[in-house]
Amino acid sequence: MKIAVTGATGFVGSRLVERLHKEGNRVLVLTRNTNFAQKVFPPEAFPHVEIVAYTPNVSGSWQDAIAGCDGVVNLAGEPIAEKRWTPEHKQEILNSRQLGTQKIVEAIANANPKPTVLVNASAIGYYGTSETATFDETSPSGNDFLAQVCQAWEAEARKVKDAGVRLVILRFGIILGLGGALGKMITPFKLFAGGPIGSGRQWFSWIHVDDLVNLIVQALTKPEIEGVYNATAPNPVRMADLSQTMGQVMNRPSWLPVPAFALEALLGDGAIVVLEGQQVLPKRTLEAGFEYQYPNLQPALRQILK
């Protein structure tokens, strides 16, 4: 196959490109920074990776490169929990997903021949936050900022169906691997200063990065997979349990909680991503027969931190 990938140099995207390339596929990497992409995917190691410069929110000649691809994986988006949510940053978070997806769909609609499938990222932020509710793919959306971003993001992706292209929307949970959220939590534990963030009661719906990559590959290759799927492990945990399990796996204490006000001082409204969670179950994902390598937290953390 030939697969186009946006967000290819990121935490998930780079793992996906490696996997697709290893399995003998050609990969079209759409990137804002071609120099960086060439360092991540050097031609001698990735001879079947083609790197194309693109401006995610603007139509352009880059869209022509989509023609002849069998599938598109759209992972691009401004990081959500990296810095304070100023009004400008919130607009960037929204535009990078809504306009970025709009331009990808436009490219697919105009392509000849067209890709047969778009796998589009979304997030479990779609459901809003709750300490008590349980959500699956049939649950209604929340009404906070992240829920509104996810609704706008998914609405743009759905327009690809007008072009007769199969659509799979994957609502990502918190992705565990050497990077992302977990990467930031490892250092305090190494320094014997690890502990739960905030109250510890908030839900943490997670997925191992290898399971996420497997799920994306299945979405690309199985024509019967269509619609919305939660990309979360079937066994979410509370923050206190995550912290305790990390301590056990790393043989470190887990007694020093990070107070909510400290995170809010750093991230402002963006702290909601970590301080308020949601219990999300992958009902449709399991019904589709997806087999998790890491359905439980402790083996997942052992594999990552070994």
Image (spheres, rainbow, N blue to C red):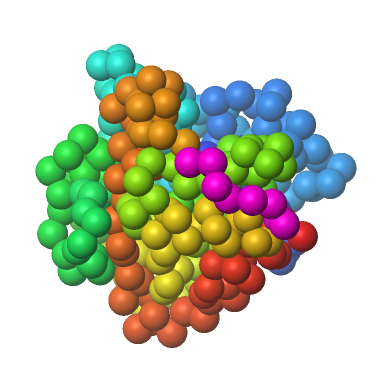
Q: Residue at x 24, y 56 (%)?
A: 131
Image quadrant holding the C terminus, namely bottom right
Look at the image and give the residue range highlighted in magenta. 250-257
Can you say whether 53 is above or below 215 in the image? above
* Residue 107 appears in the figure: no
Q: Is residue 2 magenta?
A: no
Can you say whether 99 is above or below 284 in the image? above
| Prevailing secondary structure class for the magenta stretch in the rendered image | loop
Q: Residue at x 43, y 72 (%)?
A: 235
Q: Residue at x 21, y 49 (%)?
A: 128
Q: Residue 296, how many percent across, how many down?
A: 53, 73
Asked if residue 70 lies left or right of residue 157, the reply is right
- Return the residue nearer the eye: 42 or 162: 42
Q: Residue 213, how many percent across, how many down?
A: 56, 61
- Return the residue nearer the eye: 35 or 28: 35
- Return the residue nearer the eye: 292 or 280: 280
Asked if residue 196 lies left or right of residue 287, the reply is right
Q: Residue 75, how many percent across, how many down?
A: 46, 45
- The number of discs equals 0
- Return the residue nearer the eye: 49 or 257: 257
Can you say whether 52 is above or below 137 in the image? above
Image quadrant holding the N terminus, namely bottom right
Can you say whether 131 is above or below 221 in the image? above
Q: Residue 157, how many percent across, how many down?
A: 28, 49
